Image (cartoon, rainbow, N blue to C red):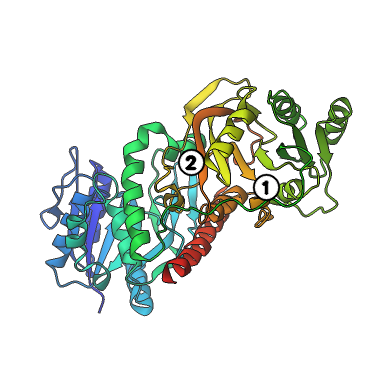
Amino acid sequence: MVSIAAVSAVAGDERAATELGRLAANPLVGRIAATTAGKASLGGAIRALQAGELRSSAAVVETLRWFESTNLSHLLWSFSGRAVLSAIDLRRLTQVAADTKAALLYSDYYDEKSDGPVGLHPLIDYQLGSVRDDFDFGHVVLLSRESILGLADEIESQTTSGEFGGWYDLRLRVSERGPVVHLSEPTYVARAAAEMSDELAHFNYVDPRNRNYQIEMEKVATAHLKRIGAWLPSPAKSPASEEGSFSVECSVVIPVRNRVKTVGDAVKSALSQKANFSFNVIVVDNHSTDGTFELLKDLAAKDDRLVHLVPERRDLGIGGCWSEGVFSKSCGRYAVQLDSDDIYSGDDVLTQIMTIFKRENCAAVVGSYTIVDSSLKLIPPGLIDHREWTNENGHNNVIRIHGLGAPRAFHVPTLRQFGFPNTSYGEDYAVMIRLCREYRIGRIYDSLYWCRRWEGNSDHALPLETQNRYAFYKDRLRTIEIAARQQLTAR
């Protein structure tokens, strides 16, 4: 029979404390504990934990030791204290946990709205590649006793996690012990809370102020990859041999569809580069209908370094357009990315990138960029340099993070071995995680690129359904890559 110990973060919230008291009265709940701060008071039946944050290593260890002292079968873990869970809903969770023998169970939920009815908040399925530290489990998870016994000692003795990574460390270890199950139905309501803006949330993980967080999470993720046989030593394979000749040394590739207001600036930025090697600009125009075609045609007539390609196919995403460009006869030995919304920050960007290619014999080079508005005014967090990528461990840490940065540049003969997936999201990530499995990636931490944010950006204010689809796709890419790396280490 399922019996529950529950732990929650109350954080000075009197309403959360009230909900905790209601949970304590549920006959399925045998023991209950909470972290608290501020003036919120806990009832006599609720154990007050010393640790302040349920995501820290100290809090995780304290909670697990408290749970081990009970004889209960499951631990209900509430991260925020915002979940309102009825007796019926809790019974449903426990039934599914018993039926599936889940090591960790989580579910969809309803979001409470301050200005209207509640709305459904669906989550995505967990998979082997769901190893990013911001995977969304919602506000409540249910952990089986078998999946967490002994983990307090392991986490305490192995100093990979600390202030930030305790929960991350715990859930990765739990995933190694049994299935992580998503119940795709709502079982609770999450009370409204102040939310981070879409723009801040989009770049929060690479904010330089979060550097200590990044270092800790990398340690936790690296230890997990080692335990599951997916960690690799530094890649040492040389770029692919070059067969045939190239018309130019370097090509700037710009996929575009309906960006008449911005693509002209991007093209002019690329053509204004100063270099002691030959280069061209390949714009793959994906059947634009807003005047982009006519603009590019006019620019190409004035400068023969601009190659204006219109694919025969009409089913291409951004990745498909990239493949059109890099497999075209006009493409140079190296290909450098530029989005149709953006511009290079100087006239020596191609020179800096080519210097790294020649010096380090790498298959790709990734630069850094600065977030600006349409008038090039700086927007926080400003410089995005992805210093979570290191030469020593970047090829492993890439499995945890969301991307590598921009501009991205490729040794074309090596890139042609793989090409791009025909998608309009994650296509660059797919290529980079595949390349760094075997090949060295060069990095430039100085800003090379103005990333212009405006309401027309393809990742601006995405609906939840689209966010979920994108997140699931990247997790699928990680799943494929982890499986491939496990095969390599098993040989």
Q: Amino acid at mark 2?
A: Asp
Q: Secondary structure at mark 1?
A: helix
Q: Is residue 491 above or below residue 390?
A: below
Residue, disc 1: 412
Quadrant in the rendering for residue 174: bottom left
183 left or right of 337 in image? left
Q: Secondary structure at mark 2?
A: loop
Residue 106 or residue 354, whichever sits in front:
354
Determine contact: label 1, label 2, CB under 8 Å.
no
Residue 307 or residue 12, whichever sits in front:
307
Q: Is residue 348 above or below residue 100?
A: above
Of the 4 image quadrants, the one containing the C terminus is bottom left
Label whose residue precedes the other's in the sequence (1 or 2): 2
Residue 2 or residue 340, whichever sits in front:
340
> Which residue is drawn at the image coordinates 15% and 49% (left, top)?
42
303 left or right of 170 in image? right
Percent x, y for residue 133? Answer: 39, 51
Quadrant in the rendering for residue 28: bottom left
Q: Residue 115 bears which disc, if any?
A: 2
Quadrant in the rendering for residue 253: top right
> Which residue is drawn at the image coordinates 67% and 36% (left, top)?
339
